[in-house]
Amino acid sequence: MSKSKKYKIAVIGPIPRDFIITYRGQEIRKYGCITHPVVVLSKLLGDKAEIIPVSHVRKVDHPEVMKIIKDLPGVNLEHISSDKDRGDVIYLRFLDQNERVKTMMAFMAPILIDDVKTILDSDIFLFLPVTDFEVTLDSLRFVKEHSKGLVIFDAHGPTKTMTGLGDRLSKFWVDRDLWLPYIDILKMNRKEAKYCWYKKKYSLEELEDDIPLARSELPNFARHCFKFGVKALYITWDVAGCLLYTADQHGEPLETVIPAMHVDDVVDSTGCGDSFAGGLAFGMITTDDYIKAGQYANVMGAQCTQGPGFQCFKSLEETKKMISDTYGEK
């Protein structure tokens, strides 16, 4: 990394070609997932950081992906590869503001050790899989064992699988405890929490419902994560913001509610979780404060809802004002 660069952040996961039908019937075509945090981090850090997207894309999509991010300040394009000609294509049809039907039409080649072995000097590794095959446990373990960087991991990937018909469905993260020792900060939404903190046995009725994990169970889940070395757990809670769990000196969970930034109108919620993760990475690398990082995460997620394109993301100065207006802090 150049001495002029203060930070180095690896953003690891797919860049899917998304075909989206919003809940209002609007059709949107864009490249999603890690493009959101890459744009967020570039907007907030600019030339102060080297931002390294790590992904596999299809050859047909490579030129368009490059066109989107090639002029972003601070972005290193060397680790976006189309050599394997395999990348995600996802069709999303929203049923309401948040719920959506998802179908995978093409599948990314998984991120392997060879994809991350030359960027081990990164300060933060932001892993953002959207389906269970995209990031291997071996690559995550390799990063944790050979780097001093902070590992932020999104549970969206291991709680989603794909059928032979291309349907993307929720699944239990059954091998969760094999992954937790290599994660510093774990992020998920309230429904994904249900598939991360599961019972030993369910009734048929319980398996048929779609009720998120009870909030009263989240401290138990957090306590379990802390035993494996996780430092912080973030659960996004829709319009309520997010819940942050950290451990006290005895390993017991402390809950902090970080309210959402109010928005008058949600245009498109696609990519909100990924944008949240970008804000989280920015907050951690610049403040090393879990609550402040959660505030940046909430605000960047809220910004993402304001338009179908990346122009919805604001500058650092504008974002800081939103932080101040929402949380009453300078």
Image (spheres, grey):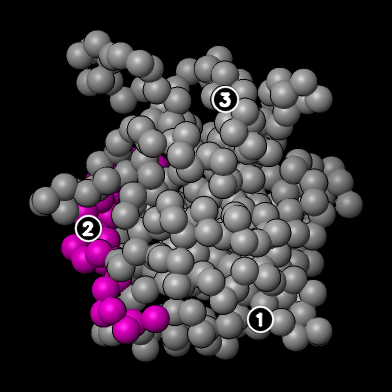
Sequence-first disc among 3 and 1: 1
CA separation, marks 1 and 2? 31 Å
Q: Is residue 122 above or below residue 264?
A: below
Residue 104 has which mark?
2
Q: Position of residue 43 (x, y in %)?
A: 66, 72
Q: Which mark is residue 74?
A: 1
**Judging from the image, what secondary structure is the residue with disc 1 in?**
loop
**Magenta residues (range):** 81-107
Residue 122 visible in the snapshot: yes
Who comes first in sequence, dot 3 or dot 2? 2
- Tell me: 288 left or right of 210: right
Give above or below for 75 relative to 126: below
Residue 189, percent across and down?
48, 38
Q: Provide the secondary structure element on which disc 3 rests.
A: helix
| Relative to 20, 124 lies left or right | right
Outermost residue, left direction?
Answer: 165
* Picture residue at 63% right of the left edge, 38% below the top: 230
Q: Amino acid at mark 2?
A: Met
- Name the quarter where the N terminus is drawn: bottom right
Q: Nearer the viewer, residue 145 or 126?
A: 145
Q: Amino acid at mark 1?
A: Gly
Q: SS class of the residue under badge 2?
A: strand
Front one among 113 and 303: 113
Marks 3/1: CA–CA distance: 37 Å
Q: Residues within 10 Å of mark 2 (few under 14, many from 20)?
A: many
Q: In terms of image quadrants, where is residue 18?
A: bottom left
- Residue 144 position, x and y percent, is 59, 55
Whether label 3 touches label 1, CB < 8 Å: no
Q: Which residue is mark 3?
A: 224
Residue 86, magenta (yes or no): yes
